[in-house]
Structures are given as C-alpha cells and as structure tokens.
Image: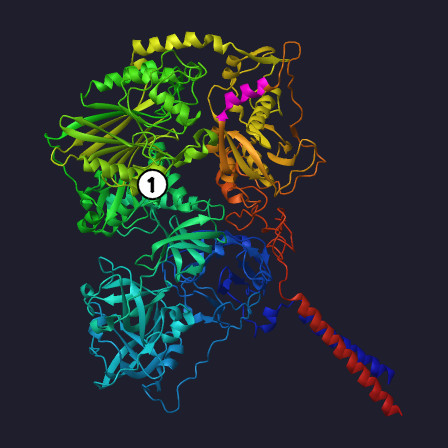
Amino acid sequence: MGNQLRKKLCYMVFIIALIFSNLVPTSTAIAADKGDVEAEDLFISEYVEGSSFNKAIEIYNGTGTDMNLSNYQLNLYSNGKTEPTNTETLKGILKNGDVFVLSHRDADAAVQQVTDLTSAVVNFNGNDAIALEKNGEIIDVFGEIGDDSDFAKDKTFVRNANVSSPTATFRIDQWTDYGKDIFTYLGSHTMDGESEQDPGEPTNPDPDPEPEVSTIAEARQLANGSEVVVEGIVTANSEALSNGNQFSTYMQDETAGVNLFNFEQGDLPEVQKGDRVKVIGTTASYKGLKEVVPASIEVLEQGQALPEVQHITLEDLQNKEVAESYEGELVRVNGYIPSIPSSPAGGGYNVSFIDQDYNAMLLRIMENAIDIRQVAEKQWYDVTGIVSQYNDYQILPTEQADVQVAQQQPEPPSAAGEYETTVEKITDGDTIRIADPVFGSDRVRFVNMDTPETYAAKNKAPERQEINENQKYHGDEATKHIQTYIQPGDKITVKVGEQPTDDYGRLLAEVITADGENVNLEMVRDGYAVSYFIAPMDEKAYPKYQQAVKEAKDQGLGIWDEANPLLELPFAFRANDDQKGFLRYVGNSATKEYVVPDDWEDVPVEKRVFFSSPEEAESYGYQPINTGKPSEDNLLVQFLSMNDLHGKIDQQYNLDPDGDGVFDTYGRMDFVASALKEREQDNPNTFIVHAGDMIGGSSPVSGLLQDEPTVEILEEIGFNVGTVGNHEFDEGTKEFMRMVNGGEHPEGKGTEGYDGMNFPQLCANCVDKESGETILPPFHMEEVDGEKIGFIGVNTQASASMVMPDGIADIQFTDEVAAVNEAVAALQQQGVEAIAVLAHIPADQAGDGATGEAANLAREVNDAVDIIFAAHNHQVVDGVVDNKLIVQASEYGKAFADIDVEIDRTTGDIVKKDAEVVFVKQSDYKADPNVNKILTKYEHQIAPMMNEVIGYNATDLTGDYSNDGDHGLGNLLADGMKSVMNSDFAMMNGGGIRDDLLAGKVTWGDLYNIQPFGNTLMKFEIKGKDLVPIINAQLSKEYGPDYSISGFHYTWDPEASKVVNVTHPDGTPIEEDKTFTLTVNNFMGTSKGSKYRPISDLGKKPVMGPTDLDATVEFVKSLNSTEDDPFLYAAEGRISVAKDEEEPTKNPGTDNGDNGDGTNVDVGNDGNNAKKQEKHDGGNTLGKDNYDDNGDNDGNSSMSDNGNGTLTGGTKHTALGTAGSQHDDGSKLPNTATNLYNLIFIGLALLGGGVALYLRKRYIANKAS
C-alpha cells in the first residue's frame, strides 16, 4: 500500500513537473498558438492610430527563435511620400513569441504600459504608411506607400491570426478593424497560421449562384471585395456626376445609401433620379467613401418617389459618426457661402459652406450638374444634397434646384479670433495637423507666407530636374526649420482671419507658440519662407511680413542664400509644375499699380500682392501699370526735411549706414547745411521743413544757451516751416513760446538780442485749455508757380506724459486725426489739394510700407493728405501706407530726407512722389562757412559754463558696465536718477557711462563727458517680482551684469547667468506683488532689444523727467561737497556673485531677454523655454524634453520631464533592458506579458496536485476503515 501510494505520488509530481516545464518558457502569445506554425520573419502585428497622441506599432516574433533587432528598422512614409520621412533603427533581442511595441511619448497610459520604445517614427496619421525593413529591404508594410488616403484614421487594426508571414504589399484583408482607441490587444499577439479550409467540390454544384439581395446597410458592413446584390432608388442622374468614361451615381433604400462607381461606363446604363434599380457588384472604399462597384445594373422601375430628404445641421455633421451614418443619403442643410473658387478641380468646384459658428463642410458642385455662375457668394443657402466623402465629408448637390437662396439672410458669420489647440504633426514648412480641430479642420495652412514644396514633382521634363531637386531640398529644410519653433504635442494658438479655410478645407491661420512667437513671421524672417499675400489680406500684418522678407533677402538667409538659392519661388514652382501657368495679377503696394500674371517678377518680392482678376485689383485701388513718361505739364517740387535734431549742432558720428563694414564721419550742422543747400540747387521749387524735436536734450553749445544757437542755424539754412515735438516743451509752454516769438530769457541764460524764429511753427492739436484755440497756427500755405501747397503740423498726444506736467498745465494735445482732418478741410476751402503733414509721431519701416502711429494716422486721415513727415522714434522710414508717403530721416543731424513730387496742374494734387533718406558724410561736403562761424562763436561762449565747479570727488571713479559687480561711478549716477525722480529703484546702463570721474573738482563739463547723450529719465511702475526678469535680461554669460543699480541689491549665478536673490539694501526680501517705481533713461525704457525690452514690457505708467545729465548735476550739487569734505563713492556690494549655500529667491526662473549667449527667454516663461533656446543652442536645457529622431533624449533611452526640471526614465522598460535601463549590450528584451501568467498556471497546477493527493489519502483511509 505504501509503495503504491509512493508510486502514485511520484506520478503526480512527474505530471506537475511536465506542466511546469511546458509553462515556464511560454508567453501568452505562444499559449494561444495552435500547432507548430512558425512565422517566416518578424511582421507588424498591430497598428493604433487613435485620438490625440494614441499612436503605436506592434512587431511580433513568431519565428520559433529569438531575433536580433539590429537588422531591422521601421520607416514612416508621410502624406503619400515615396521616401521615408522618419526612421527608427531597432536594438536588442526580441524573444520568440514576444512583441515589441513602439508608441508616441504622449500616448494613453494603457499604451505606455506595454510600450518598449517611444519614438518619433510613430508620429503618423491615418493617411501615412509604415514599413518594416530588414537589411535595407522592405519585408512588411501597413498602408500603401505613395497613397495619401485616410484609410486608417482613428482606427486600431490587428493582424489576423492566420497571417504567419510579412508581406511587402499591403493587404487590408489581412487586418481586422477594431475601431477607435482600442488598446485591448496591444502588448501580445496570437498567430495560428490556419486559413479557411477549401470545402472541395460540392455534391450538387451550382455554377453561378446569385447572392441574396442585401439591404444597403448590410452591404456597407461587408468587407471590401465582397460580392453583393442591392436594390434601391437612384438619387442622382449618373450623367450629372460621371466624369469622362467613368460611371458614378448614388442609390438609397430604407436602410442607408451608397455610391455606385466604376472607372468604365461600359455596358452600364445611364440611370436617372427615381429609377429603382438592382445592382450586382463588389464592395469597395475610396478616400473613406463606401462604394459598390457595379458589374451590372438592372432598372426595375422608373419615376419612383425619391427617399425623404432628412434635415440636418452642419454642426451635426462635424461628428464623424453622425456623418458616416448619413453617408450616401439625401439631406438638406442650411449654410453660408463666403466665396466661390475661380476654377474647378477634378470636374467640380470645392465651395466652402459654413454656419453661424463656422462649422464647415465642403459643397462639391459638379460642372455637369450645376451652373456655378448661378450660385452667388456671400449669401445663405438651403442645399439639398447627398452626404459624400473624399477623406473628409462633403455635401453633393446634384441639380440646380438643389441650391436655393435661403429666405432668411442673417449677418455673415465671423471666424476672426484666436483659438488654442495642440500640434499633432508637422506636414511641411507651412502646413501642420492639429489634435483639436478648429472650424472642423485639423489641417492648418500658414497664411501670409509660402515655403518651398516637398511633394514629388509632376513635371519631370529633363530641363526641370535641377529645379525639382532644388525645390525639394529647400522644402525639406523649411520642414526641419519649423520644428525649431513647434513640435508635435506643443500647445499653440491659431490666429484666424475673416476667411478661416481655403478651398481645400484647410484652416488659414497664423500660428503662435506658447512663448508668443509668430511662427509664420519667424519663418519669413529666417529666410525659410517667402511672404505671400492674396487679397483680401490683413493690412496690419502686411508690412511686418514684407519688412521681414526684405531683411532676409538682403542678408542672404535661407532661400535667399546666393551660394544655394531657391531657383523658383513656391507659387512659381506650382505654376510651372502643374503647367497651368500664372493666373494671378500682381500688385505693387508701393505704386498701387498691377501687372499681368506673367510679369510678376517686375514687382519686388517685398511689395507683391496677388489678385484673382484686374477687377479685384482695381477694387483695391490699384491701376494697370503705366509705362509712359510723366506729363511735362506737371509741376516738380522738392521737399528737404529733418527731424529730431535735439540741438546737437556740434556733434558728429562714426557710422556705417549702408552696412558695408566701412565707418565714416557723419553729421554736424555745418556739413548738414552744406548738403541741404547743395540739394536745394537741384530745384528752385524747394521747401526745407522739419518734424519737431529740433531742440531739447541738446549739446551744451546749444542747451546752455537755451537752444537759441540751434534756432540761429536753422534760420541760416533757410527752413520754411516746422512743427513741434515733445522736447520743445521740456521747459514748459511759456519758455517755448518765447523761443518762437523772441525775447530775452528771464534769467539771462540765452543769447543777446534773441528775436525768435523767422519761419512758422505749426501745431493743429496743441490747444490752450482756457480759450480752446491752438497756441500755434494749425496749418500754413505756400504758393509756387501758381500751385498751392499746404503744410499741417501735429504733435503726438504722448507728449503730455513725456514732459513735466506743471510746465504744460495750460495746454492739451488733442486727437491728431481730428486735428489733421479739420486743417485739411480748411486748406481745401482755400483750394489746396497738395498737402503734407509735419507729424511728430513715430513710424517704423515695414517692407515698402510703415507701421506705428504715423501709419495709423495715414489710414485714418482724409485722403487729401499726400505726405506725412514722421519723427519722434529716430528711425529711417521711406514707405507708403494708404497711398500716403511716410518719411523719417534718422536723428541728430546724421541725415535728411529728399522728397521729389509732381503736382498735376489741372487738379492741383500731388500725383507722384518719391523719397530718399540721405546720410551726411562729411567727406562729401565742405563745411558751410556761415554755420561754422555760428558754431565757433557759441563754443567759445560756453567754455566758462563747461568749467563750472559742481562739487568735489574724493577718489578716482572709473567703470562703465558692472561686469565685476557694482562700482562707485555707476552707484553715483544711479543714486542721482533715483533721487531726482523720487523713485524706489534706478538702473543705469553701462554703455551710457562714457568717461571716468577723477578725484578733485567736478565740473559741469566732466559730468557732460560722462553722460553726453542727453537721454531723458523715465519712471515706470513695476511689481517687485518684475525685477528678476529685468535683471536677468541684462546678464551675459560671457561678461556678467551690465546695469548699475540703486535702491536694491542682488546676487547672481555666473554659471546659470541668472539672478539668485533680490533684496532691499537692508537684506529684507523684495515684496513680489507690491508696486514699486523704477527709473531708467529713455534709451533703456524704449529700446526693443532683448536686453532692455523687459523694462518697457513690464513697466507701466511711464513718467518723463529731466535729462540724465541734468539729474546728475542736480544730485552732485545736493551732496554739498567741498574741497575739504568731498563726496565719497565706491563699490558697496549692491551686485555680487551668489554663494554656494545661498537659497534662491522665489521664482528666479522667470527671466526674459538676452542671456548674453544668443538664447532668448520670454517673460514669465518659468522654465518653458527650451523651444526658443533649442533654436540657438540645440535646446539642451532642463525643463522640457528634447527628443532626437529616435524619440530619446540621448539616443538610448526615452526620457521625460518629472515636473521639477529634471529628466527621468519615462517608459516602463526600454529596448535594452529592464525598467530604466540604458545598457547598449544586446541584452534580451524583457518579457512583457508572460511572467505573471506563468506563476498563476504553476500555482494552479500545484494546487491541483495537492488536492488530488489529499483526496487520494482520504480514499485510502476510508477504504482501510
């Protein structure tokens, strides 16, 4: 008995061991296998293309042996391309029966759980193909390479279990579609190798049994290639929809509708609406549309009632499931047609159809069915049609009566606005896909710009080979470059105009990054795109892009690089590649003339506007180009103008105005006088004018004498008329009016016998508060050779905040536009049509146009205005806005403008105008003796003033930039700024400190030599936390700090080039949310350079003060120093390097501006700056992953951001080892789906064995008893 029991126990243990030995090496995939079927090689076993970033590819090893993955790579073919757009070379060992899963780094957690490698190669969409390659040859493929159809969008496909070998030809019948976001099968695969058994010959063969009639709904569910018989009512005349020899119509029964399509009409009958037909054919799909390819059509009855038309909204059809349920059926939809394409595409017109909320759908209007000329744009319609599909759903009306003007005609929809979304995919340099559709579109076409094409050229003529290759090269470069700004997964804002989509349903938008960068504009500025404006266009955006393209072209960037230029601009390439030629008329925005399409090259790239027709061009005020000579009857007049001299009558400058690297001496008013008088000789009808700020902030030779020397020089030159700027009011209204009218200065500061200005000063918006009258004439009229010319003066309203309020308490600066228009009306009453505005208002060059307040003035004032002389921001401007010439000629006597105009003697109006800004190079002229004599006289007169003793200094004070920490001279100047402006803090830029202050007497001339620029102090309100980005912006990794400071201390980290701590002088922290005041000079406060920009961006409520020199003089005087008791300034630790143990101030990372090494970080970015830094230094920064082409941070392992700026292993395991492993030693892949199940099976087997032993013992015991 004992021996038998022992034998049975041994048998039981043996059985358990057998079970155990079979289970241990087995995966779930092998457990599911049947028989001993082995795969011929690795193959793709699952494809996931779900919502958002749910994208994955699974590769299965069923070969019976472990496989080395280093022989394999996965290739992505995007958007119908025939060359790989991304590649992932695999690594490691894939065990037999296991799978290898690649996924998107932002995929759902359920996908990430079974992922072996995150990779950019899975950044596919449903219209892309992906191929598995072995040793350089494709062995398996999902999708058809070169096909752009959305066959797999929002779907999970699993390889059928009977497939046991890869195939280089895609076969959809090998795959099962499980729908959207199904991840159940990912991470394992079943392969049994079994196929349907051949049933052999039937006992009673029926040669051709006809399938039973199916409902259309049933037929739509059948796999493609299935034979089917359906009956229903024809809903469209076949000749209306068919193209050439093709056959196309639709039919519908009580269950559904379907398209009938055959490439050849053949013997198929032409069918009519209302025919009841029986169709025998096979199921198919094309571009998402379910079809029956008819082999035969039998007309059973004619004249039958059509199926009831179903009413539905465009909003309903945005839901793809809803739209699919209506596909092939008759519906009626209400919507608005904003525009109609000028030409058909593929036998029909693609017409945008939108509702009030801009839910959009394409109306496909076939040429054979409907006369498009009877459909008007900008109206609401009720449209009856069939729901069809060509990648996207569309409505297909089939006869003229289907398109009816709606009875209700509400206001047109407006799409203009900004919408947040996420980048899903970069298609090319000017097209992306977005995860969250806007107005129903998930494709975005960047507006206002155009990048080279990347598609395979159609025109393969031998002479175009170089052009085609060149276009593709630059297109690929643009595609790469745009990824320095945006990447899949990035949050973006799309800025949409009134017309949100194009004829292809793509969203037309500017793309703004999370950092606020306009990607469209930056691509043009970097030279990877050309500006591209088709009317109607954004008038405000136009000058920015045209200025950007001009600058890129002038600098030879990107496509403009002379070493490898783009041979054909994108629009020209498309015209030549399609062999349709040029179709759009091209306008010159500077001349308001247009040329015929083939003459497009006659218009400079920075001045091009494209129009669909001459009528459209002329509706925008353009005229056909006039090649004839100007009329000899016109009166030729010349204007010479200056602005912003600021009394710098004795100053000269070392400049390189043309950027050729050669510097020369420019300026000084005795040379300027010579240049102006020389130009005046060219035309006896010359007027010399100015646009304000000719005095104020002046050199000592003028300023110490109340700027009366400057007035004397202007009179000597022969100025005819001028206006005022803000600096004319630096000492108040009363003093300025003395300057105009003459009289001795009450304190005797001026020149002897000063008699005022001998030419008119104008200001139409300088109004006395008490009387309501202007304090100066608003306009002035001159007459030359019988023609009248009007001048109007106007000053920026901003002047009120730029001068001391007490000095101008008696006047106000009224609205500039209203003042100009009132003056224009008065001039026109006197018969004046040639009108120029002297406007102390800022302008900036923008392509052939201008931006700024002067540009706004041009758009808003009466069109009788011909020229605007701008000023105030010291720029060089020569542009046209709204057919008004805007000119500004630099600053400080460096240059002047020369404007030639023609006046039509019939109308009295200016009909032609041309400007030039001329820099006064001293070597080109001889100093004018009369002006030189004036300068010499006053230089001698001020010499005693220059030597006035202001105070006494104890030590030599040297230094400019605070690179090594604060220094005594900078502290003195910053303290003076803070004291005089009564502010909490002050900052002084190192570049503005031009000389040392030696120990001993301090004269006025000493201080002038230190601060010679005459900058004006500005006081801003800021928050305490704003100090950090302002300070960070001026820190240079190479040189360190720039500014001298007062009112606070800070420490900084030289390695990070960032602030560590900011405190009050007593060491207490700066209150982040408290409002403080900060004083800087106007150069710092208005500069748009990255070092200074945070000041103006963050500073609020600016208040203007005295010049920096006046402030320093006043402060030094206030120290009451004497020779025996001099003032003492030195470095005192205001700026210092942080100690290692020092705790950082809260939120030290909100830096902004130039870190000194080319990197740029935006205000309040708080770490999300890797994208902009990547553009310059590769983006090797903490705070955001920087994935390479392999989807990994360093090419080995996937990394992710754990939220605190550090990088950690981001996937469950890698292809090279267990979780977090980064070994490249060929170690085997981890078992992703078997170990847990092995343990369960072993445990069950042991439990079963134990139960059996127990029952056996009970049986024996019972038997013995």
Residue 1034 placement: quadrant: top right
Query: Which residue position holds label 1?
Result: 856
Residue 67 image position (x, y, % from top left): 57, 58
Q: Quadrant of the C terminus?
A: bottom right
Residue 40 image position (x, y, % from top left): 50, 64
Residue 215 image position (x, y, % from top left): 36, 84
1134 in the magenta segment: no
Q: Quadrant of the N terminus?
A: bottom right
Residue 1164 image position (x, y, % from top left): 55, 44
* Along the line of sight, the residue nearer the viewer: 583 or 776: 776
* Along the line of sight, the residue nearer the viewer: 577 or 612: 612
Q: Main secondary structure of the magenta part?
A: helix
Which residue occupies the extreme front position in the image? 771
* In this rendering, position of residue 868 left or right of residue 1199: left
Q: Residues within 10 Å of mark 1 (few under 14, many from 20)?
A: some
Q: Residue at x 36, y 75 (%)?
A: 326
- Helix, strand or loop at label 1? It is helix
Q: Residue at x 83, y 83 (%)?
A: 4
Looking at the rendered structure, the kind of residue marked 1 is: Asn
1107 in the magenta segment: yes
Q: Which residues are magenta?
A: 1106-1117
* Along the line of sight, the residue nearer the viewer: 1038 or 812: 812
